[in-house]
Amino acid sequence: MIISKDKSILKEFNAADEASTLQFMRNTNIEGTVFQRFLPDLLKLSADCLVMQIHHYGISPERLMQDTNLTNFFKVLTTSMDGDNKVYVSTVQAHSYPVTAFQWYPEKNALNGVCP
């Protein structure tokens, strides 16, 4: 909301208390991102439910791409799908600053990788 200068940019998503996957954006190079530090087995995040989602609000990739303030500041690394099959942005990285933002909990064990 701070970068976009739009207090109503977030929308409701059904992603409270569930394990999910991360879908890497096409042509995502993990070099220079937080994901370069992950062990190769952990990079299966797009195949296994290894990340924990505990939120009710987020932003869709389409909405983020419509906001030039956000696209000038962030690059989308991953998306995820909520319980209603709606896609939202789950990881972004700043273009010019050492900032990565998560819409998931990298420190939380996600129910042993079992999807709902």
Image (cartoon, rainbow, N blue to C red):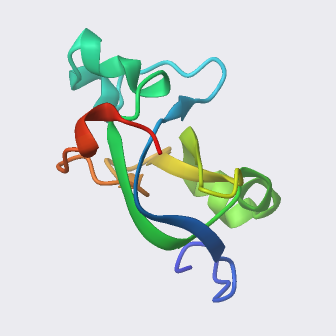
Q: Is residue 109 above or below residue 62?
A: above
Q: Nearer the viewer, residue 58 or 98?
A: 58
Q: Is residue 45 above or below residue 75?
A: above
Q: Nearer the viewer, residue 78 or 7?
A: 78
Give the quadrant of the N terminus. bottom right
Q: Looking at the image, which residue is at 61% across and 68% down?
A: 13
Direction top: furthest residue: 40
Coordinates of residue 39 in the picture (x, y in percent): 20, 16
Q: Is residue 93 above or below residue 86?
A: above
Coordinates of residue 3 in the picture (x, y in percent): 56, 72
Coordinates of residue 81 in the picture (x, y in percent): 61, 47
- Residue 28 appears left or right of 17: right
Q: Looking at the image, which residue is at 26% across and 12% down?
A: 41
- Residue 44 appears left or right of 109: right
Q: Nearer the viewer, residue 5 or 92?
A: 92
Kindly indicate the quadrant of the structure image that contains residue 45: top left
Direction bottom: furthest residue: 7
Q: Looking at the image, which residue is at 47% across and 46% down?
A: 91
- Residue 7 appears left or right of 56: right
Q: Looking at the image, which residue is at 27% across and 10% down?
A: 40
Coordinates of residue 112 in the picture (x, y in percent): 24, 35
Kindly indicate the quadrant of the structure image that contains residue 33: top left
Q: Is residue 102 above or below residue 67?
A: above
Kindly indicate the quadrant of the structure image that contains residue 8: bottom right
Say how many tags the image has: 0
